[in-house]
Amino acid sequence: MINIGAYMDLDGFDRSILRCLQQSTRFTSEQIAEKVGLSATACQRRIKRLRDTGAIVREVAILSPDAVENRLTLLVQIVVKRGRSDVIDAFKRDMMTYAEVQQCYYVTGAFDFILIVTARDIVEYEHFTRRAFFDNPAIHEFNTTVVMEQVKVGLEYPL
Amino acid sequence: MINIGAYMDLDGFDRSILRCLQQSTRFTSEQIAEKVGLSATACQRRIKRLRDTGAIVREVAILSPDAVENRLTLLVQIVVKRGRSDVIDAFKRDMMTYAEVQQCYYVTGAFDFILIVTARDIVEYEHFTRRAFFDNPAIHEFNTTVVMEQVKVGLEYPL
DNA sequence: GTTGAAAGGTTATTACG
DNA sequence: CGTAATAACCTTTCAAC
């Protein structure tokens, strides 16, 4: 245990279990056991270890955007002001705190950051941009793209 | 139940419960009960209903990119060939099938689709682009951005 | 070190007020 | 909705590999 963040060696059973749990955490250990070809007890032991070592970061519910009346998803490309790394770090910390920001990627290329932002409507997004971008001296320019359809949404890794 | 996709009216308790489950599905109903101010049984009843109505789409494990040795994340902007809507639909179906494609958004603006793609390394990504893009007549052009740091990753909605 | 079966303890589900 | 009984599940133990 307690080897968080480091490289972990997972065998085929571990990978099979993780493949299941990426699909759904509502499988019982017996269901998983049947799929991976191990006893339920062995599966649970392994799942516990995968949690403890940090291979499984967390287990969460994914909600329907409809249900939460959050129908707008936006993609924002950001260019920050050049020169100081502390500006970058501050921006990262800011983005962590905004509930509207689902995802924030620090990227190479023409832009510095790319955000996936969620909002109830354009007005709410407008307010967000005011708080997060216009009032932020670190931001040189930003560019919003409206998502028309979420074709695929997930955080699964191929195993 | 069975009102999937439609607008659902959630009261404050439901929203509190969803807020918990977006953070972690490992809370026991008693823990949730304490947080939201309801009995454990009432919480479970509501959770069952939230699942049945589709407010909770699914419950999944989020893995560490390190653990699965999948250290590359890429952002791909795609322009498709104009004219036929069946080309768009076919492209969407394709993207659903690729395990490398974590997310696919159909967007407005200069590009048509934006993908979040994951790969072991550049070579694996190269192979993916060959299969998914170069051999795909629907694609007019595509543009890859390398993610240097995943500052924030999630699918939570503000409640 | 690992496994699997049966014990016990915890949690979720059902029945009823 | 909440309380209490039932059922399902997870965790621990332990013998064996």
Image (cartoon, coloured by chain):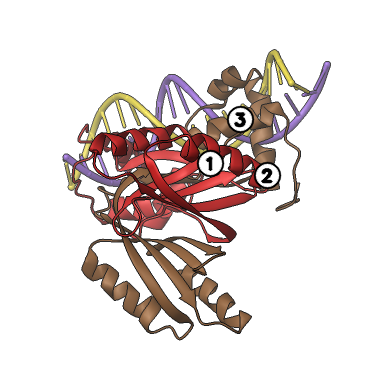
Chain colours: A red, B brown, C purple, D yellow
| Residue at numbered disc 2 | A67
Secondary structure of the residue carrying numbered label 2: loop
Q: On the picture, is B100 further left or further right than B26?
A: left
Distance (Cα) linking label 1 and label 3: 28 Å
For the point 62% across and 21% down, the residue is B36
Of C10 and B44, which appears nearest the observer? B44
The amino acid type found where label 2 is placed reads Ala
Query: Marks 2 and 3: same chain?
Result: no
Q: Which mark is residue B17?
A: 3
Query: Marks 1 and 3: same chain?
Result: no
Q: Looking at the picture, how far across and down is residue B130, in whole percent?
A: 32, 79
For the point 75% across and 51% down, the residue is B6
The amino acid type found where label 3 is placed reads Ile
Q: Are marks 2 and 1 in contact (CB under 8 Å)?
A: no
Quarter-of-image position of residue D10: top left
| Residue at numbered disc 1 | A129
Secondary structure of the residue carrying numbered label 3: helix
The amino acid type found where label 1 is placed reads Thr
* Quadrant (top left, top right, bottom left, bottom right) of the C terminus of chain A: bottom left
Q: Which is in the foreground here, disc 2 or disc 3? A: 2
For the point 24% across and 42% down, the residue is A83
Q: On the picture, is B54 further left or further right than B34?
A: right
Query: Marks 2 and 1: same chain?
Result: yes
> Visible in this render: residue B4?
yes
Secondary structure of the residue carrying numbered label 1: helix
Q: Chain of mark 3?
A: B
Q: Which is in the foreground here, disc 2 or disc 1? A: 1
Q: Chain of mark 2?
A: A
